Image (cartoon, rainbow, N blue to C red):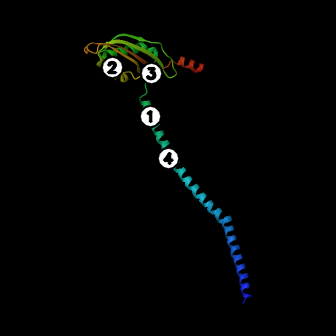
C-alpha cells in the first residue's frame, strides 16, 4: 500500500507538471496570439472612432465654408449693387457747385468754400473741402443727415459750430471740413506702382 501512495504521488506530480505546462502554454499562446489580436481590435475600434469624429468635423467645416461662401457672395452682390462710382478730381468745380446747392437746399448760407491739396492714392484720390457759413443748428443737423445719401463719396473730417446758446433764433457760424473721395488719376497710380510706393 505504501508503494501505491508514492506511485500515486508520482502520477500526481506528472499530472501537476502537465497541468502547469498546459497553463504555461495557454498563457504563452494567449500573450503571443490572442492578446495582440485583442490589442489590434481595440486599436482598430479606437481608430474607427477617431476617423468618425474627424469625418463629422470635416462635414461641419464644409457646412461652415459653404455658409461663408454664401455670405461672401451676398456681400459681393450688395457691394456691386451699391458700389459708388467715383468722379475724377478734375470735376471739383461741379462738386463744389453741387455741394453749395445742397447747403442752400438745407437753408444754410455758405460764405466761403476752400479746397485743399489733392492727395493721390491707389484706390482713390482725397480732396479736402472746407465750407464756412451760417445757419441754425437744426438745419446743420438736416445737412448732415442728408449728406451721406446725396454725396455717398464724401465724409466729414471736422465740425465746428459757434454761436450763443442763449439766443436760439440766432444763426450760428460753422466750419465743416469734408473729404471727397475722387477717382484716382491713372497716371499717378501708374507712377506709384512703378515706384513701389
- Read off the residue under disc 3: 86
Give me the residue at 57% from left, 18% from top.
191
Viewer-nearest of discs 3 and 4: 4
Query: Of the residues tagged 2 and 1, which is closer to the observer?
Result: 2
Spatial CA span between label 2 and label 1 = 29 Å
Q: Residue 112: x and y, percent?
A: 37, 9
Quick one: which residue is furthest to the top in this view?
Answer: 111
Mark number, residue 60: 4
Q: Which residue is mark 2?
A: 143
Image-based side of 78 in relation to 9, left or right: left
Q: Which residue is mark 1?
A: 75
Q: Dot 2 surroundings within 10 Å: few (below 14), some, or many (20 or more)? A: some
In the image, residue 36 above or below residue 122? below
Rendered location of residue 56, percent (x, y) = 51, 50
Q: Quadrant of residue 96?
A: top left
Disc on the earlier residue, 4 or 1: 4
Asked if the residues shown at circle 3 and circle 1 are in contact, with their CB atoms under 8 angstroms apart, the answer is: no
Q: Residue furthest front?
A: 2
In primary-sequence order, the first of circles 2 and 3 is 3
Q: Earlier in the sequence, mark 4 or mark 2?
A: 4
Amino acid at each position: 500500500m505504501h508503494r501505491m501512495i508514492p506511485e500515486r504521488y508520482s502520477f500526481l506530480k506528472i499530472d501537476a507538471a502537465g497541468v502547469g505546462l498546459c497553463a504555461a502554454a495557454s498563457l504563452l499562446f494567449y500573450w503571443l496570439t490572442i492578446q495582440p489580436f485583442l490589442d489590434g481590435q481595440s486599436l482598430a475600434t479606437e481608430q474607427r472612432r477617431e476617423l468618425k469624429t474627424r469625418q463629422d468635423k470635416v462635414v461641419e467645416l464644409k457646412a461652415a465654408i459653404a455658409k461663408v461662401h454664401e455670405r461672401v457672395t451676398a456681400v459681393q452682390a450688395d457691394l456691386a449693387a451699391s458700389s459708388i462710382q467715383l468722379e475724377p478730381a478734375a470735376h471739383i468745380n461741379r462738386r463744389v457747385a453741387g455741394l453749395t446747392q445742397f447747403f442752400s437746399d438745407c437753408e444754410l448760407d455758405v460764405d466761403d468754400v476752400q479746397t485743399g491739396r489733392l492727395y493721390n492714392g491707389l484706390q482713390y484720390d482725397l480732396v479736402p473741402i472746407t465750407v464756412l457759413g451760417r445757419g441754425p443748428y437744426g438745419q446743420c443737423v438736416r445737412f448732415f443727415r442728408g449728406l451721406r445719401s446725396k454725396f455717398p463719396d464724401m465724409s466729414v473730417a471736422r465740425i465746428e459750430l459757434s454761436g450763443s446758446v442763449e439766443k436760439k433764433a440766432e444763426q450760428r457760424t460753422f466750419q465743416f471740413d469734408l473729404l471727397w473721395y475722387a477717382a484716382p488719376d491713372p497716371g499717378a497710380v501708374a507712377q506709384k506702382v512703378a515706384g513701389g510706393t
